[in-house]
Amino acid sequence: MTTITKPARSVDWTKDRIAALATPEVKQLRANAVRLNDPEIMQRCDAVLDERPRGRGTAKKAVPGAAPKPRRKRKAKAPEANAPETGGAA
């Protein structure tokens, strides 16, 4: 009788080791665990991702109902020194 066993992992993914990875790497590891049907690793990745802040760093969130900031107007170009003068004595 033949029994099917999981192949031995070459890397033991502990929660501490997963936490040392950058967020995109943890997400990729989780995607690989889903593909390989490894619920233990999926749960560890989820736990690490849940502990991390969401979003893009210190970006400020828009306040609902607040008016958007007006755009800056571009400064007019300085007149060039070689431009012909107007209205002078000839």
Image (tube, grey):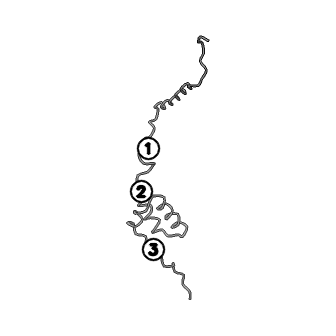
> Of the residues under marks 2 and 3, which one precedes in the sequence?
3
Identity of the residue drawn at 47% across and 76% down? 10
Dot 3 lies on which element?
loop
Q: Is residue 75 positioned above or below 19 on the image?
A: above
Q: Which residue is mark 2?
A: 50
Q: Is residue 82 positioned above or below 7 on the image?
A: above
Q: Residue furthest top?
A: 89
Identity of the residue drawn at 51% across and 62% down? 28
Give the amino acid at mark 2.
Answer: Asp
Q: Residues within 10 Å of mark 3 (few under 14, many from 20)?
A: few
- The Cα atoms of the two marked residues, 2 and 3, are separated by 23 Å
Along the line of sight, which residue is nearer the eye, 67 or 58? Answer: 58
Give the amino acid at mark 1.
Answer: Ala
Q: Residues within 10 Å of mark 1 (few under 14, many from 20)?
A: few
Identity of the residue drawn at 41% across and 60% down? 48
Q: Is residue 17 positioned above or below 3 on the image?
A: above
Q: Which mark is residue 11?
A: 3
Q: Residues within 10 Å of mark 2 (few under 14, many from 20)?
A: few
| Position of residue 16 measured from the top left corner of the image (x, y, whole percent) | 37, 66
Q: Nearer the viewer, mark 1 or mark 2?
A: 1
> Of the residues under marks 1 and 2, which one precedes in the sequence?
2
- The Cα atoms of the two marked residues, 1 and 2, are separated by 19 Å
Q: Quadrant of the N terminus?
A: bottom right
Dot 2 lies on which element?
helix
- The Cα atoms of the two marked residues, 3 and 1, are separated by 36 Å
Q: Quadrant of residue 13?
A: bottom left
| Position of residue 41 measured from the top left corner of the image (x, y, whole percent) | 46, 68
Q: Quadrant of residue 85?
A: top right
Q: Which mark is residue 59?
A: 1
Identity of the residue drawn at 44% across and 36% down? 63
